[in-house]
Image (cartoon, helix red, strand yellow):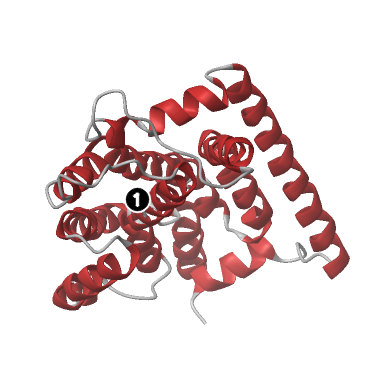
Amino acid sequence: MAESDKNKEDELAGTEQPFVAHLMELRDRLLYCIYGLAVAGALLAIWPGPSGLIDMIAVPIKAHMPPDAKLIAVGVFSPFFVPLKVLLMAAVLLALPWLMYQAWMFVAPGLYSHEKKFALPLIIFGSLLAYGGIAFVQFFVLDKMFGFIQRFTPASVAATPDIASYVESILSLYIAFGVAFQVPIVVMLLVRFEMVTVEKLRSFRGYFVVGAFVVAAVLTPPDVISQLALAVPMCLLYEVGIIAAQYFVKVSKSPEAEGEASEKADSA
């Protein structure tokens, strides 16, 4: 066994916890997540409020509706539950860095010291990528998608979508793009934990492009605009992840462990 492996084992020696302790820690982290969501929800309920949030997310589709047209609520309880759903969705987005931090705190005891210092940059980078994906949907994809659909709407048909179906549709797009934009994070972690090499990722590029278009066809509505809008950024982010993985692996190596290994080798 290599000296560096021995050093890593020594670093985590004696840190094992009983199963009950893990359950208690999981409970505490889930409670902290609930507290964070409650605070974020309270802030958003004060400003801009559920109605203000509905107005914000309705901007892309209203831009392609007739003047003075409004979204309709078909369901009896839709005017009450749909704003609450939007408020919860916005609270999750606002508290996303806090939620990711709690997830990291749960797994942190099992990480080495040189791995822990990269958790905060990954949390910030992952949150920014998720926000970037959602913003890309809100300010580009929805506008182009509804414009594309509107051109095929007959003149005799009034475009008055139901608010519940509209919210469900854009929520699925938010989730799809928010997760898809995490491709660089996934690539960096796969390379860092030596599950795959950068050379393998480069040779896998063609398969990833095909897979990206398949995923886009499954997760997005059946229109070319939204499918291309998801697949093309995924391919570009894959390349960004390959470039970032080379730097991330280089700087995330533990100089302390390597120094100790070399000292032990010299003394031996």
Residue 58, image quadrant: top left
Q: Residues within 10 Å of mark 1 (few under 14, many from 20)?
A: few
Outermost bottom residue: 1
Whole-percent x and y of residue 78?
A: 58, 42
> In the image, is 230 to the left or to the right of 47?
left
- Residue shown at 59% from the left, 38% from the top: 98
> In the image, is 169 to the left or to the right of 100?
left
- Residue shown at 30% from the left, 61% from the top: 220
- Tell me which amino acid carries mark 1: Val
Residue 203, image quadrant: bottom left
Whether residue 46 is situated above or below residue 115 in the rendered picture: above
Q: What element carries label 1?
A: helix
Whole-percent x and y of residue 128?
A: 38, 39
> In the image, is 5 to the left or to the right of 12?
left
Residue linked to disc 1: 251
Whether residue 89 is situated above or below residue 260 in the rendered picture: above
Along the line of sight, the residue nearer the viewer: 51 or 88 = 51
- Residue shown at 28% from the left, 73% from the top: 197
Whether residue 244 is situated above or below residue 44 in the rendered picture: below
Outermost right residue: 20
- Residue shown at 77% from the left, 66% from the top: 16
> In the image, is 194 to the left or to the right of 22?
left
Along the line of sight, the residue nearer the viewer: 162 or 123 = 162
Along the line of sight, the residue nearer the viewer: 242 or 252 = 242
Along the line of sight, the residue nearer the viewer: 246 or 235 = 235
Q: Can residue 268 be seen in this view?
A: no
Whole-percent x and y of residue 109?
A: 68, 56
Residue 226, image quadrant: bottom left
Q: Is residue 133 visible?
A: yes
Outermost top residue: 47
Whole-percent x and y of residue 215?
A: 29, 69
Whether residue 210 is situated above or below residue 33 in the rendered picture: below
